[in-house]
Amino acid sequence: MFRRILVANRGEIALRVVRAAHDLGVEVVVVHSEADRGATWLDAADDAICIGPAPAAQSYLDVPRIIAAAEVADAEAVHPGYGFLAENPHFAEVCESCRLTFIGPPSEVIAACGDKAQAKEVAKRAGVPVVPGSDGPIADAEEALRVAAEIGYPVILKASAGGGGRGMRVAHTELALRSAFDQARAEAQAAFKNPEVYLEKFLEDPRHVEFQVLAGNDGKVIHLGERDCSVQRRHQKLIEESPSPALDEDLRRRMGEAAVAFAREAGYRNAGTVEFLLDRDGNFYFIELNARIQVEHCVTEMVTGEDLVAWQLRIAAGEELTLSQDDVALRGHAIEFRINAEDPSRGFAPTAGRVERVVWPGGPYVRVDTHLAAGSRIPPEYDSLVAKLVVHGRDREHALDVARRALREVRVEGPGLATTAPFHLQVLDRPEFREGRFDTGFLERMLATS
Ligand code: MV4
């Protein structure tokens, strides 16, 4: 195992990595920006190094500064968390060439999975179902029209370098597709410096179901069940749960096998997530692979009893993945509610500032992952996630009861601050949600009618 690692991230995930490392007897140095001076998670670490000013481009995204910090800290490995540099193949490669272990998959695998059109080809080779569409990127509008005529409208154009919902355009007619093609390419070029787009049949309000995988250094791959992440707004997930109310034993087995087959074909290593869309008829389609630990990994930890971040460290340190598929049993039901410093009554506008008073829930069946305490500052420069409330129950109904009790206890007070906690209580009252009958259109429908 490593003697000391560096965490190139902030907030709750930095704290999460510190905890996993300390459980394994590993020392942790965290880097931070000037905006995060005095933040709570720095106290939990063994050392902290300020690497630059508040803007992420000059701190958490600045590769040379982070590498320099790792050298000063005498760290053997770097954990990127999620966001920032987590899926940047260039960063992983620089770590590798500086003899720092990147805690994640090899840089070539990050690059291959980062190209969504390429990842789709990997899925096809693995015999994993994909949404009908173009074979790889599309050359011109004529080709887009030809493919669309074959598969039928509506269709969706996606940026090869996109993902997570960025750079997508839906077209319902030939006329719309013609103009959407040039716009999609221009947008992709502007956003990702890569104009490539591919085309798929557009699925109406699918469910988003993703499988957690772990891949050992010897190529052994297992899955740890799924997470249903359909409750999202503008591609920002708000609630995630495991197991998915939409899956039965048979579908879970088939999707799990598909996730494992994909990871194997991709040469995947370490922890990753294979995302699928699930339609109303129970057909599932691979869409992308996330080559990082995800925000919502905790729900999988609750139902499997495994520490995913500890597994990331063990695998990166060259240890064997001793867990086998038969060892993985899903127990009960877990639901995660993202507590964001946002005001739901103002279109989920981010709120920032000084926190004067905080109360986090506790008691049986409750886990709160947060860095936020009284006296904390919520900087306007970063993501608005301030806590994850994860509840665990014997079954989904029990988990929903625990969620209501716990969400009522949440207090985050300070001038101008608001959170998503009261909104989650409203979601809990919706029959569609209570009964598990939700899809990726659920929240937008709820917001349109309330
Ligand atoms: C789709 C789709 C419908 N049809 N692809 C958005 C995020 C990205 N990972 C893929 N996304 C979608 N791809 C086809 N062919 C609908 C979405 C989508 C969505 C997917 C997952 C979770 C939330 C979503 C919200 C709107 C659209």
Image (cartoon, helix red, strand yellow):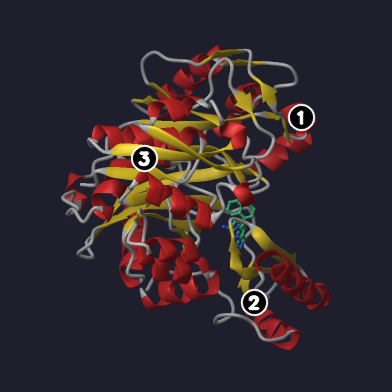
For numbered disc 1, what is the local secondary structure? loop
Q: Amino acid at mark 1?
A: Ser
Q: Position of residue 441 (x, y in %)?
A: 65, 46
Quadrant that contains the C terminus: top right
Real-space Cα separation, disc 3 to disc 2, in angstroms:
34 Å
Which is more toward the observer, 85 or 442?
A: 85
Q: Amino acid at mark 2?
A: Glu
Q: For marks 3 and 2, give the one nearer the viewer.
A: 2
Residue shown at 47% from the left, 19% from the top: 401
Which is more toward the observer, 19 or 180?
A: 19
Specify whether 450 is left or right of 284.
right
Specify whether 54 is left or right of 220.
right
The residue to which callout 1 is attached is: 450
Q: Amino acid at mark 3?
A: Thr
For numbered disc 3, what is the local secondary structure? helix
Mark 3–mark 2 CB contact (< 8 Å): no
Mark number for residue 196? 2
The residue to which callout 3 is attached is: 300
